[in-house]
Amino acid sequence: MDQTEKTPLALEAFLPYTLSRAAELVSRRFATIYKDHAGLTRPEWRTLATLGQYGTLTATLIGAHSSMHKTKVSRAVQSLEERKWLKRRTDENDRRIEHLELTREGERNYRKLAELARAFEAGLKDTLGEKSFAELSRGLDAVEKQLGTDVF
Amino acid sequence: MDQTEKTPLALEAFLPYTLSRAAELVSRRFATIYKDHAGLTRPEWRTLATLGQYGTLTATLIGAHSSMHKTKVSRAVQSLEERKWLKRRTDENDRRIEHLELTREGERNYRKLAELARAFEAGLKDTLGEKSFAELSRGLDAVEKQLGTDVF
DNA sequence: CTAATTTGGTTTCATATGTAACAATCGAAT
DNA sequence: ATTCGATTGTTACATATGAAACCAAATTAG
């Protein structure tokens, strides 16, 4: 007897759905941190975080490290530049390239937000429990390892 | 000595990021199924899947079951109605309410897509490995259980 | 060397989204 | 019965997004 005749698909147990739902739940909560504390959008936060982590980078590299579309990066960089949180420096040998770097102000805000981010993650680990958190992390790593080779 | 002085936050190991990234990777792949095979958007697919699973529902309930904003549901229902994949029936006692139900055509397409969805998930389980898949599922369940009480 | 191609990044345009305002209806309170 | 508030669903508006066109600069091909 085929179970699927009655319920071809249970959405609440279907991984693409549960994964997307969990991501939204976590994302929504985490967003309050960079939105409320700094008025940043998600692309802006990711750009800040990537530059904070890696130091000087080009826009293309920011996109690669943070999995963002180049138009998102472009707009986020503009916005952070207007805030004076980052500065551009055109490459001397290749004038298409711009090296992007956080200003002192940007660096300061990055550290502050990074601390809140770590606290958020710690709270999440606490809420989920050490074991579930570790399982989730391992599962996500597996996804990244298997599907993450896509350029985009 | 404080490790965070050098790298306040490693994005590739930060759960809100890895979760969001994994969701996008899986979502992008799964989307090809309902897009290529039926020309559906994600809200349309979710609406179809929810009605297919639960039978007759109101728009509000579809939103609750599929975690979609009511405007998304409203637009998806319109579109599916135009395709003649669902029909509306106004409640006799409360004329604000519309009972939504798949047509035979809608049902047929739902079953077809549901089968592809199950195959997709099976392939994913295969790719990730039984163990990682199970860990991921449990981790996601924990997230849902702890954070899923938000209405939205 | 010049033309064609590629690359880094921005802008344009069409689409998708959510907030808020809205219309219609219902239920409760007076 | 009438008014007020809540609920169901749609629409209008402003914003976010990505595909594609685009510009400028560099590289490759002929």
Image (spheres, coloured by chain):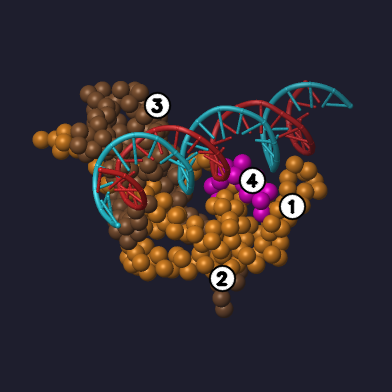
Chain colours: A brown, B orange, C red, D cyan
Relative depth, front residue between A100 and A124: A100
Q: Which of the numbered marks, if any, corresponds to residue A15?
A: none
Q: Residue at position x 49%, y 59% from top?
A: B32
Q: Residue at position x 61%, y 41% from top?
A: B71
Q: CA distance from mark 4 to mark 3?
A: 31 Å
Quadrant in which the N terminus of chain A appears: bottom right
In magenta stretch: residue B12: no
In the picture shown, does residue C17 fall above or below B121? Answer: above
- Residue named by callout 4: B75
Amino acid type of the residue tagged 2 in the rendering? Thr
Relative depth, front residue between B150 and A104: A104
**Where are the magenta residues, as a range?**
B64-80
Q: Which of the numbered marks, if any, corresponds to residue A4?
A: 2
Q: Position of residue A6 (x, y in %)?
A: 61, 69
Amino acid type of the residue tagged 1 in the rendering? Arg
**SS type, badge 2:** helix
**SS type, badge 3:** loop
In primary-sequence order, the first of circles 1 and 4 is: 4
Q: Quadrant of residue B36?
A: bottom right
- Residue named by callout 1: B88
